[in-house]
Image: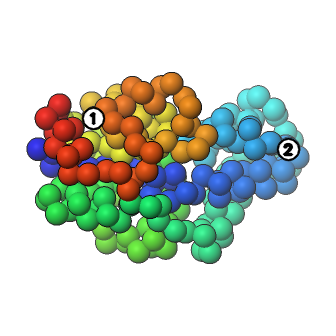
Amino acid sequence: MFRAAVFDMDGLLLDSEPLWQQAERTAFGAAGLDLTQRDVCQTIGLRVDEVVEYWRSRRPWDTNAHPASAVERAIVDEVIALLGSEAVALPGVEATIELLGSQGLRLAVASSSPLRIIRVTLGALGFSDTFEVVHSAESEPRGKPDPAVYRTAQARLGVAPAEAFALEDSVAGLHAAQRAGMQCVVVPGAHQRDRPEMQEAELVLDSMSDFTLAHLVGLAGGA
């Protein structure tokens, strides 16, 4: 049986992707870069600095007037402002957390978001004391799909890769978890659902509400 479960945050614990997309369009727009809804969906799962670099390398703007670091801060500030009124846990999240806790699993969060956004989000959702380990990829050399954020979470939990599984919503997160040697349950977001890579996961669910003890036992049997 597993000893731990490691959760992604954005798009999994709450439907925050629309908030990130709105914040990115606002911040980039202020810098003179007009991104469409389709544009911002291309960087789902990346760290905010990687999102800024992605667009800086493809559609350069006047970085003297709007430095990349300033755009990053603007995105984060806007997301935090939006979270204050719109942070609601997705269906099934609380029940899944309770189920895993009842089975004695230790819980962690491994997210691409900056730590201050993670803390604000968990507080807004009422999960401030739920997760034993909370780790941000901002402190790693690279974000997802690099496995570093998951490997550090494993180390801080004191578990081996086979002793924990991940819960994700994006392809970048799925690949990060699997490259860290973990099985992965994915609950794809709306803009990730049709990506064929999702079928690489050990379990694909339409909603966290669908996760059951039988799924947990089945995953553990395949570990």
Question: What is the distance, in whole Å, between disc 1 and disc 2 at their CAs?
Answer: 38 Å
Q: Quadrant of residue 193?
A: top right
Viewer-nearest residue: 210 or 35: 210
Name the N-terminal-most of marks 1 and 2.
2
Q: Secondary structure at mark 2?
A: loop
Could you tell me the amino acid type at mark 1?
Met
Q: Secondary structure at mark 1?
A: loop
Query: Residue at the location (56% across, 31% down)?
Result: 194
Find out whether the residues at labels 1 and 2 contact each other: C-beta distance under 8 Å: no
Query: Residue at the location (60% across, 52% down)?
Result: 17
Q: Position of residue 187 (x, y in %)?
A: 44, 44
In the rendered view, does 124 fall on the left or right side of 41?
left
Question: Which scheme is used to colour this image of the protein?
Answer: rainbow
In the rendered view, does 36 fall on the left or right side of 174?
right
Q: Position of residue 111 (x, y in %)?
A: 44, 50
Q: Position of residue 81 (x, y in %)?
A: 66, 70
Query: Residue at the location (48% across, 25% down)?
Result: 197
Instruction: Give the label on residue 34, or none.
Output: 2
81 relative to 166, above or below: below
User: Local crowd at mark 1 within 10 Å, few (<14), some, or many (≥20)?
Assistant: many
Q: Let me know if residue 131 appears in the view.
A: no
Query: Residue at the location (54% across, 29% down)?
Result: 195
User: Local crowd at mark 2 within 10 Å, few (<14), some, or many (≥20)?
Assistant: some
In the rendered view, does 110 fall on the left or right side of 220?
right
Could you tell me the amino acid type at mark 2?
Asp
Instruction: Give the label on residue 191, or none.
Output: none
Instruction: Give the label on residue 182, or none.
Output: 1
Quadrant of the image containing the N terminus: top left
Quadrant of the image containing the C terminus: top left
